[in-house]
Image (cartoon, grey):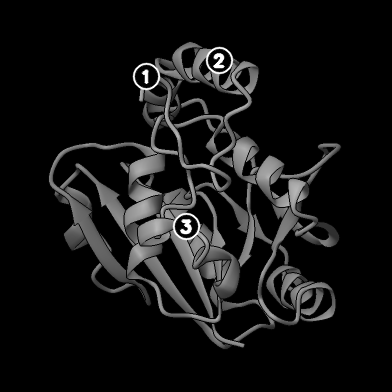
Amino acid sequence: MHIDVLIPTYDRLEPLKKCIKSIKEGDCKDISIFVMVDGNRKMIDKLKNEPVEVLFNPERMDYIISMNRLMKHTKGDAVLYGSDELTFSPDCISNVVKAMKEHFPDTDGLIALKQVNKEGGAAFGLLGRKFIDRFPDSAVFCPEFIHYAGDTELKRFARSIDRFYQCREAIVDHPRLNDNTFRLARKVKIRDKQIYKRRKNKKLLWGNSFERIGN
């Protein structure tokens, strides 16, 4: 099973390099890493010696649009969506792949990772190809969101069709750095949470109807 790992980034060069290193040094080797540089052209040259394929948003689009664009670009049997400040445990990806093969051998499912020191499902996970193909243009994250809540609605959809599994053996460290990337994202947190609440109240669930508020 070939895995595509997707990582949007803005200006976190050193955390991103650490993230890439943790993936490449892990015990799962059938992997391709795709990085979406989100509106920061200076980052492109700084990544040319990294073992990744780099894509570029000329203007900053933030996480949801970047991830959907990356998702459309992939061809792997399964796709792991992550973040540029994550550090993967050595057996994280091999464990989540094992869980996919065990629980959704047809690749029609979502396997959530486990964050260090956090209860419940992580914001990150592995999507099987058949599950991704349920979404037009592979847009698995609802485009009404900018940064937050898209992963929550995605997991709600997966649970609603009994295609969700939490893999507690697939562990990532997510430090939540208080830097420029974090501060830019925080500006849209209230807006995204309000959209999520409105969508939930209207019983809209991306993946069922692909409806958006106001349509």
Is 21 placed left or right of 162 in the picture?
A: left
Q: Mark 2 points at which residue?
A: 198
**Type of amino acid under label 2:** Arg
Left or right: residue 170 compared with residue 21:
right
Disc 3 target residue: 135
- Of badges 1 and 3, the one in the foreground is 1
Residue at image mark 1: 214
Q: Which of 35 and 13 is in front in this view?
A: 35
How packed mark 3 is, by other alpha carbons closer than 10 Å (few <14, some 14-19, many 20 or more), is: some
Q: Residues within 10 Å of mark 2 (few under 14, many from 20)?
A: few
Give the residue type at disc 1: Gly
Of label 2 and label 1, which has the lower sequence position? 2
Look at the image and tell me in which quarter the N terminus lies: bottom right
Residue occupying the point 54% across, 41% down: 206
* SS type, badge 2: helix
Which one is closest to the eye, mark 2 or mark 1? 1
Residue 213 higher or lower than 108, as above or below: above
Q: Residue 153 carries which label?
A: none
Query: Is residue 12 positioned above or below 95 on the image?
Result: above
Helix or strand or loop: what does disc 3 sit on? loop
| Identity of the residue drawn at 70% across and 81% down | 106
Q: Which of 125/94 is in front?
A: 125
Disc nearer the start of the sequence (3/2): 3
Q: What element carries label 1?
A: loop
Mark pair 3, 2: CA separation:
21 Å
Q: Distance between the residues labelled 2 and 1?
A: 11 Å
The mark that comes first in sequence, 1 or 3, is 3
Estimate the x, y position of residue 22 in percent, counting from the top left. Answer: 59, 67
Residue 117, percent from left and from top: 83, 39
